[in-house]
Image (spheres, helix red, strand yellow):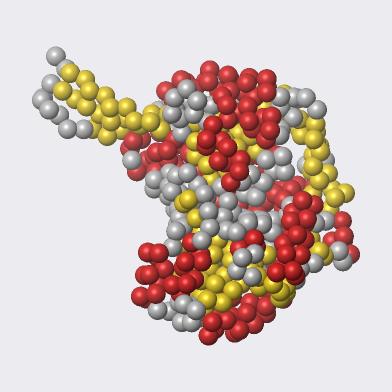
């Protein structure tokens, strides 16, 4: 059992000096160390499979830490996993929904119980700080709980309908599609595997999960926790391997798919998924999330919200704040406070108690960061940061300084998703101009606004094209949605649904309606 440290962690948790929590986490780190550097098979029907070849990954904290060597699934392995899931699908769909809910609630509790070791493994694997890693694990459990709760409040989605005569009875029943594929990203390696998997399973689909290569260990640990909790091995399978082989094959075989990742890959899946007949493809893609700061804003709150959302997990959330438009009269003061907040960001080993910003994911991310900095130097000004950090042990990892830039209006820095701790700021003459520029993007995921003026707030809410919006939020201007609190999903190029995860319209995407009329004689 995880000790009850009496402290609830979400992404909105700003700090924790709770000793019991940290001591429990420290023990999680020690347990996690014992699980590093091992060989990992993947699992079809609970049976180990070795695929073809293994890929070793290292920790972004320190290239000398080998996370593990992960078996690479071939197209044939993925075919076997989908066939196994298909064979079990009628049994799982035929299991009373109350039993599915009971099993999944147990799985959610087991995830919470194991949160310290799971989040420490995650910190090693992707470089999340303590609160962000604990948040990711607890979000996984809460997403599953939310979908179970949704199933219960809707009575299993069985609805009695109107009778045209006493002899006629019609019920409306939401039923699963069959086999669901889940392709999850590195940045929320538990939550973005657990959320779609939990929804698909509680709805009665069987699932094949393909986690990102960096994130495979968390994916496998999530799978094991579900199986340990009693989810049948026929209902949930996991394959590790590349996106171009295993991911592509998975998307070609399943009845429904949930992909979270880049716009390019997501749109590719969305365009090609349905070949023979229409099938659901839920794609959650990128963001280029804007913040608007009005002259009526509390600037301290705004600076805090921007800093936390631009630099939290190194800007590697699709919800990260990457653009800020500030009304001219408060621009200088906002910039001053933002520089101050940024200089207070503690960068270093994310396993350490007081570190906020760990490494970014890999060398390719460092290259993107360096290209963005070069563009700001050429076409604007680097106000703060802009360099790789190599002091001491950081030399063995992929650490960079949190960065604030000013950039010319036509710079690509305003358009391209970077996924690094990097925010561009500009002056605007009015909130209306801020809105026009905020919406000038192919994306529409999250957005933030800071103002004490209610009319302005109403205009922002009406005018902004984004699925998740926050007003005057110091814990995150654009990040930190929590299940049952902020449904999370994007508009435009950010997502297919406009029906957020952890919200009331998500689960039914995993089901199809059957209207059943029976004439009694
Ligand atoms: C993602 O980064 O892919 O609101 C989505 C947040 C997180 C976002 C997760 N729940 O910041």
Q: Is residue 346 above or below residue 489?
A: below
Q: Position of residue 489 (x, y in %)?
A: 48, 50
Q: Nearer the viewer, residue 84 or 253?
A: 253
Q: Position of residue 92 (x, y in %)?
A: 47, 25
Q: Nearer the viewer, residue 469 or 344?
A: 469
61 relative position to 405: left or right? right
Task: Give the image quarter of residue 37.
Answer: top right
Residue drawn where x is 16% and y is 17% of the image:
520
Quadrant, the C terminus: top left
Residue drawn where x is 52% and y is 37% of the image:
270
Q: Position of residue 384 (x, y in %)?
A: 72, 74
- Residue 499 visible in the picture: yes
Q: Position of residue 414 (x, y in %)?
A: 61, 63
Q: Is residue 6 above or below residue 108?
A: below
Task: Give the image quarter of residue 241.
Answer: top right
Q: Residue furthest top?
A: 521
Image mark count: 0
Task: Give the image quarter of residue 344.
Answer: bottom right
Residue drawn where x is 39% and y is 48% of the image:
504
Q: Is residue 99 above or below residue 449?
A: above
Residue drawn where x is 11% and y is 24% of the image:
166
Q: Residue furthest front?
A: 410
Q: Is residue 22 above or below residue 173?
A: below
- Residue 319 visible in the picture: no
Q: Nearer the viewer, residue 308 or 320?
A: 320
């Amino acid at each position: 059992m995880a000790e009850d440290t009496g402290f609830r962690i979400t992404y909105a948790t700003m700090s924790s000096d709770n000793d019991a929590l940290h001591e429990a986490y420290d023990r999680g780190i020690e347990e996690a160390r014992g699980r590093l550097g091992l060989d990992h098979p993947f699992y079809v029907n609970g049976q180990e499979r070795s695929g073809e070849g293994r890929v070793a990954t290292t920790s972004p904290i320190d290239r000398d830490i080998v996370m593990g060597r992960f078996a690479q699934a071939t197209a044939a392995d993925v075919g076997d996993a989908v066939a196994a899931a298909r064979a079990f699908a009628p049994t799982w769909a035929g299991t009373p929904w109350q039993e599915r809910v009971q099993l999944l609630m147990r799985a959610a509790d087991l995830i919470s119980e194991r949160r310290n070791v799971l989040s420490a493994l995650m910190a090693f694997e992707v470089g999340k700080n303590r609160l962000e890693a604990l948040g990711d694990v607890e979000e996984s459990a809460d997403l599953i709980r939310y979908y179970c709760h949704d199933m219960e409040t809707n009575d299993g989605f069985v609805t009695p309908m109107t009778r045209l005569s006493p002899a006629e009875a019609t019920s409306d029943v939401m039923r699963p599609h069959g086999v669901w594929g889940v392709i999850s990203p590195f940045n929320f390696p538990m939550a973005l595997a657990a959320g779609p998997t939990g929804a698909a399973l509680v709805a009665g689909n069987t699932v094949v999960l393909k986690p990102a290569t960096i994130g495979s260990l968390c994916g496998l640990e999530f799978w094991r926790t579900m199986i340990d909790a009693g989810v049948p091995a026929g209902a949930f399978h996991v394959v590790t391997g590349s996106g171009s082989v295993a991911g592509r094959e998975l998307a070609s075989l399943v009845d429904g798919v949930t992909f979270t990742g880049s716009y390019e890959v997501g749109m590719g899946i969305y365009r090609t998924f349905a070949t023979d007949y229409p099938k659901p493809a839920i794609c959650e893609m990128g963001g280029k999330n804007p913040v608007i700061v009005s002259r009526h804003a509390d600037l301290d709150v705004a600076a805090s919200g921007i800093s936390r959302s631009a630099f939290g997990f190194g800007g590697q959330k699709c919800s990260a704040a990457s653009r800020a438009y500030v009304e001219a009269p408060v621009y200088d003061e906002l910039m001053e406070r933002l520089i101050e907040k940024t200089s207070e960001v503690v960068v270093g080993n994310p396993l350490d108690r007081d570190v906020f910003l760990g490494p970014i994911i890999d060398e390719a991310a460092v290259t993107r960061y360096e290209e963005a900095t070069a563009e700001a130097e050429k076409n604007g000004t680097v106000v703060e940061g802009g360099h790789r950090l190599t002091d001491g042990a950081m030399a063995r990892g992929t650490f960079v300084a949190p960065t604030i830039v000013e950039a010319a209006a036509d710079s690509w820095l305003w358009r391209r998703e970077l996924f690094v701790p990097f925010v561009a700021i500009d002056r605007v003459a009015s909130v209306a101009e801020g809105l026009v520029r905020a919406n000038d993007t192919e994306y529409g995921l999250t957005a933030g606004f800071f103002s004490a003026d209610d009319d302005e707030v109403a205009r922002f809410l009406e005018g902004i094209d984004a699925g998740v919006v926050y007003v005057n939020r110091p814990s995150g201007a654009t990040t930190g949605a929590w299940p049952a609190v902020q449904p999370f999903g994007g508009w435009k190029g950010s997502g297919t649904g406009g029906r957020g995860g952890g919200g009331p319209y998500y689960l039914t995407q995993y089901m199809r309606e059957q209207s059943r009329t029976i004439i009694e004689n």
